[in-house]
Image (cartoon, coloured by chain):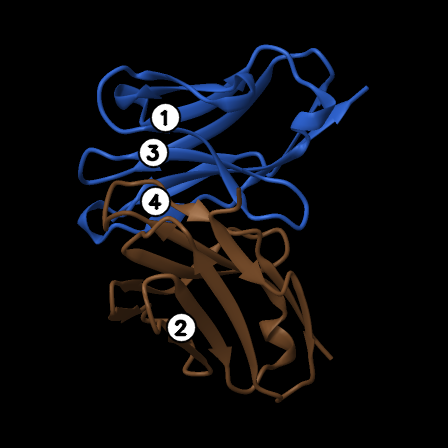
Amino acid sequence: AQSVTQLGSHVSVSEGALVLLRCNYSSSVPPYLFWYVQYPNQGLQLLLKYTTGATLVKGINGFEAEFKKSETSFHLTKPSAHMSDAAEYFCAVNKGSQGNLIFGKGTKLSVKP
Amino acid sequence: DAMVIQNPRYQVTQFGKPVTLSCSQTLNHNVMYWYQQKSSQAPKLLFHYYDKDFNNEADTPDNFQSRRPNTSFCFLDIRSPGLGDAAMYLCATSSAWGNTEAFFGQGTRLTVV
């Protein structure tokens, strides 16, 4: 069975600092992995996804993530945080052939001026 | 241009009074999902349609029903809302079942009074 663990329910960084949001997954089949962002009272917006091929994936708003099979990780990074990055971030994995997304519990990112 | 549209954005209903949330999509996707998201939690899948085939998650309460009259529209019916049903309800679509990203609407925030 697939599952996702996001370490840290709340991460706080200063504006301009590195953003690192952690995600580990378990999957019995090669996973498809996703990061979504959710602003207050909004739906989820796809940041990036890993399917196959290059393990370093670039997304929108300067975010990227690296799929590391040996570590079963898919951490999200951004070199320099902006105030507008403050939001909740969800890592998700496809439930194999069943298709629907399994979400982690989310990490709320705060950015201090 | 909005691709998955949910109406209304905010809904207040009385305890026990049936309520319907609506979702429409312009993507012509085969799969439509309804998720429930309570405060500071991950979205939880209630059910999904693949075309006209309805699939209920095992732990979705009978109080929740859904209709999909055509490809573009999907409705969530809550027959007798309880206080515990207050949440954000997210509609999403995907082009296929399995290993594809989901596109989310803005959500409907349901308040039960």
Examine the rendered structure and indicate whether residue A69 appears above or below residue B92: above
Q: Are marks 3 and 2 on the same chain?
A: no
Q: Of the residues under marks 3 and 4, which one precedes in the sequence? A: 4
Q: Quadrant of residue B8?
A: bottom right
Q: Residues within 10 Å of mark 3 (few under 14, many from 20)?
A: many
How far apart are labels 3 and 4 at the CA level? 11 Å
| Circle 1 chain | A
Query: Image quarter for residue B39?
Result: bottom right
How far apart are labels 2 and 1 at the CA level?
30 Å
Label 4, label 1: how far apart the Cα atoms are? 12 Å
Which of B22/A104 is in front?
Answer: B22
- Asked whether the beta carbons under mark 2 and mark 1 sit within 8 Å of each other, the answer is no
| Mark drawn on residue A113 | none
Where residue A20 appears, as percent x and y from the top left, is 55, 20
Label 4 or label 1, whichever comes before in sequence order? 4
Residue A33, label in figure:
3
The chain letter for the residue carrying disc 4 is A
Report the residue marked by disc 4.
Answer: A3
- In three-dimensional space, the C-alpha distance between marks 3 and 2, rounded to whole angstroms, equals 25 Å
Q: Which chain is brown?
A: B
Residue holding disc 1: A73
Q: Secondary structure at mark 1?
A: strand
